[in-house]
Amino acid sequence: IEPIQSTSHHVWTEHLVKGLLRKGHYVHSISIHETKVKGKLAQNLTYAVFDLQTNEEAEDYNPVEWEQYSVLYTAYFTYQWGIHACDTMTNTKAAKELLEMIKTIEFDVIVQDIGLTQCFYGSVSYTHL
């Protein structure tokens, strides 16, 4: 699960997916971009893309300002960002499909890029880990 709206985060996810496929694993990937795998390697791959085209950018997006935040406020700010990200992500078609999928399909491992999108933690209970 790659919920971060950053191509750089998608790149490492795609490399992980390809590595797992090379070892013969079945992989379902959800990311902000299409998982581009071709040929025989793609036989064990299913994927979905978070549809975030309607996601609006915050008017107060200012990373320079963030540098001035205290440690405690940074923790609070980051936690609030995670809640907002969950609200956005769980309303996508890809997330809704995943929530249905985990009811009937057992995954051996679920890899999530960062722990800020706590809304996806519930998917682990269905994997019998």
Image (cartoon, rainbow, N blue to C red):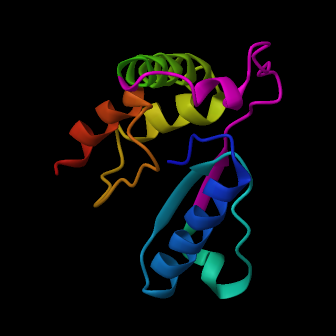
Residue 119 is drawn in which quadrant? top left
What residue lies at 61% left-to-right and 55% top-to-bottom? 9
Q: Please, what is the dominant secondary structure of the magenta stretch?
A: loop
Left or right: where 52 falls relative to 78: right
Q: Nearer the viewer, residue 79 or 44?
A: 79
In the figure, 47 relative to 23: above or below? above
Give whichever of 104, 118 is nearer the camera: 118
From what the image shows, is residue 64 above or below residue 81? Answer: below
Left or right, 47 with respect to 122, comes to right
Please tell me which residue lies in front, 84 or 96. Answer: 84
Residue visible at 74% across and 22% down?
61
> What's the residue at 36%, 53% (across, down)?
110
**In the rendered view, would you say 36 is above or below 30?**
below
Residue 97 position, x and y percent, is: 55, 35
Give the image location of residue 117, x and y in percent: 44, 31
Tell me, yes or no, whether the highlighted magenta stretch contains residue 64: yes
Q: For this rendering, which residue is in front, 89 or 61? A: 61
The mark tally for this picture is 0
Corner quadrant of residue 108: bottom left
Q: Which residue reaches farthest front?
A: 68
At horizontal 45% and vertical 24% (from top left) the residue drawn is 74
Q: Position of residue 78 (x, y in %)?
A: 47, 25
The residue segment tinted magenta is 46-71
Is residue 57 inside the magenta stretch?
yes
- Residue 7, percent across and down? 72, 53
Q: Quadrant of residue 68?
A: top right
